[in-house]
Amino acid sequence: MAFIYALYLWDPKANSYELNEHKFARKTTSELVTANQKYKDGLKDNLTDIHKHLKTLTGFYPEHIKKEDMVFFIPSMSYFTDKEKDEMLGSFWEFDRNLINEKYRGLVTDYEKSGEL
């Protein structure tokens, strides 16, 4: 988000829409988390809100991600040296590798704690 904000300061007209999209996504995600917690707390008729927020996000994210990849990310690469790009790519791969490991490590841990093993 800091990089997007810095880019916004550099060219506010071109990037204010991107900032608004991020604010919208964060707000909608927060509303989804709240609706989900209410459902967990027993408000079973809250499925309508959960469905509404999921539908909003699944409609929003494909175009947003496409825009970030094609309109924002690729052109921004011209600001970096080859070495910096290689370091970023390495960091992305490391993050992805750890993310999947953390996910499944957590699933196994939860399963072990449940006593079903």
Image (cartoon, grey):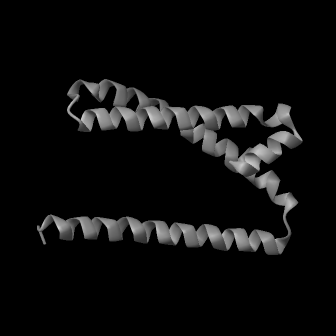
Outermost residue, front direction? 41
In front of the other: 35 or 94? 35
Q: Position of residue 25 (x, y in %)?
A: 56, 36
Q: Position of residue 81 (x, y in %)?
A: 86, 69
Q: Residue 92's image quarter?
A: bottom right
> Does residue 46 sit above or below 89 in this rendering?
above
Position of residue 69 in the picture relative to residue 42 (left or right): right
In front of the other: 74 or 51? 51
Q: Is residue 93 something that shows in the picture? A: yes
In percent of the image, x 27 and y 70: which residue is there?
Answer: 108
Q: Residue 12's image quarter?
A: top right
In percent of the image, x 64 and y 70: which residue is there?
Answer: 91
Q: Is residue 60 something that shows in the picture? A: no
In front of the other: 35 or 97? 35
In percent of the image, x 28 and y 26: which residue is there?
Answer: 46
Position of residue 11 in the picture relative to residue 84 (left or right): right
Q: Position of residue 5 (x, y in %)?
A: 76, 44
> Does residue 3 sit above or below 39 in this rendering?
below
Position of residue 95 in the picture relative to residue 113 (left or right): right
In percent of the image, x 62 and y 34: which residue is there?
Answer: 23
Q: Position of residue 32 (x, y in %)?
A: 41, 35
In front of the other: 28 or 76? 28
> Does residue 104 sit above or below 51 in this rendering?
below
Question: Count the marks: how many?
Answer: 0
Q: Quadrant of the C terminus?
A: bottom left
Outermost residue, left direction? 116
